[in-house]
Amino acid sequence: MSSSPKSVVITGANRGIGLTIVRELIKDKNIHHLIATARDVEKAEDLKSINDSRLHILPLDVVCDKSIDTFVAKVAEIVGSDGLNLLVNNAGAAFEYRTKIEPNRATLAKQFDVNTISLVILTQKFLPLLRKSASKVSGDKLSISRSAVIQISSGLASVSQNNYGSDLIPMLAYSMSKTAVNQFNKTFSIDVKDDHILSVSFAPGWIKTDLGGPNAPLTLEEAVPVLVSSFYKLDNSHHGGYYQRDLTPTPY
Ligand code: NDP
């Protein structure tokens, strides 16, 4: 079990899984800064109702480079010379797409932009702050208390478990975008091994949210505490891996 990160960033935290991750992590009194993002902070009522001075609510639209730059600079001010310990890449969207429809470049591009390209760019922009926190600790041990990036991927990202096709589950573009997230996770984990930044992908499970829909079998209260407790268990053996919320390995 790892000790607590001092600072955490969670993207897309005004509703759904992101908001519930914030609600779980705020219980950890050893976290100094919980930085939660919303595209529209004004309307992020649920997030703002969490009354805790350690919670910083900042605007971020992940598809906008200017918004990312402003956000990263603000996080740098908050965390100071400690750097950032944990980035949770949660923000995402799902647009329907099937093989047997009119080809639509705009939908495919939009899906990859929000779920994949933005996640890669945001993570790259956080590298200096992640390296800073990692460098405070000596040795090779990886953990969320040192320096880590967690990708909220999806079970639909698994190529080897895809036996349904897009007639049954019309999420072709979404699945592809999350498979690409897993590829990034693996490559990134190799690239930053010497920087001692942990990188892991999670499939949180099919959860009732605006994105997951009302037919999902899991509630946020059932799934997210399990997911968050897995964050604390991550170590070198998980680096570059893809896991279910309870840390069962998921086949790529
Ligand atoms: P929700 O639709 O409830 O929440 C999505 C969050 O992402 C919102 O906060 C939303 O902000 C934010 N977001 C969307 N687009 C952007 C953007 N351009 N910039 C910044 N933030 C953005 O979905 P979930 O909570 O269900 O999903 C969270 C993550 O979990 C996603 O990555 C999703 O793919 C993944 N996931 C979800 C599953 C499920 O069953 N629910 C299953 C597997 C994975 P806003 O309110 O402004 O739109």
Image (cartoon, rainbow, N blue to C red):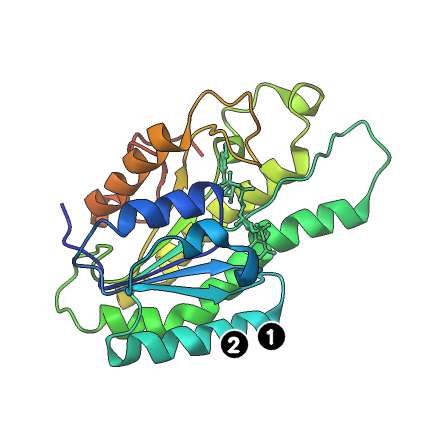
Residue marked by disc 1:
66
Please say if 17 is above or below 126: above
Q: Residues within 10 Å of mark 2 (few under 14, many from 20)?
A: few
Q: Nearer the viewer, residue 63 or 182?
A: 63
Amino acid type, residue under disc 1 in the picture: Lys
The residue that appears at 15% across and 50% down in the rendered structure is: 2
- In the picture, the disc for residue 70 is 2
165 sits left or right of 222 in the view: right
Q: Quadrant of the C terminus?
A: top left
Amino acid type, residue under disc 2 in the picture: Thr
Q: Nearer the viewer, residue 83 or 184?
A: 83
Residue 7 showing in the rendered view? yes
Q: Are marks 2 and 1 in contact (CB under 8 Å)?
A: yes
Q: CA distance from mark 2 to mark 1?
A: 6 Å
The residue that appears at 20% across and 58% down in the rendered structure is: 145
Q: Nearer the viewer, residue 101 or 93?
A: 93
Give the percent coordinates (x, y) of residue 136.
18, 73
Please say if 115 is above or below 203: below
Q: Element type at marker 1?
A: helix
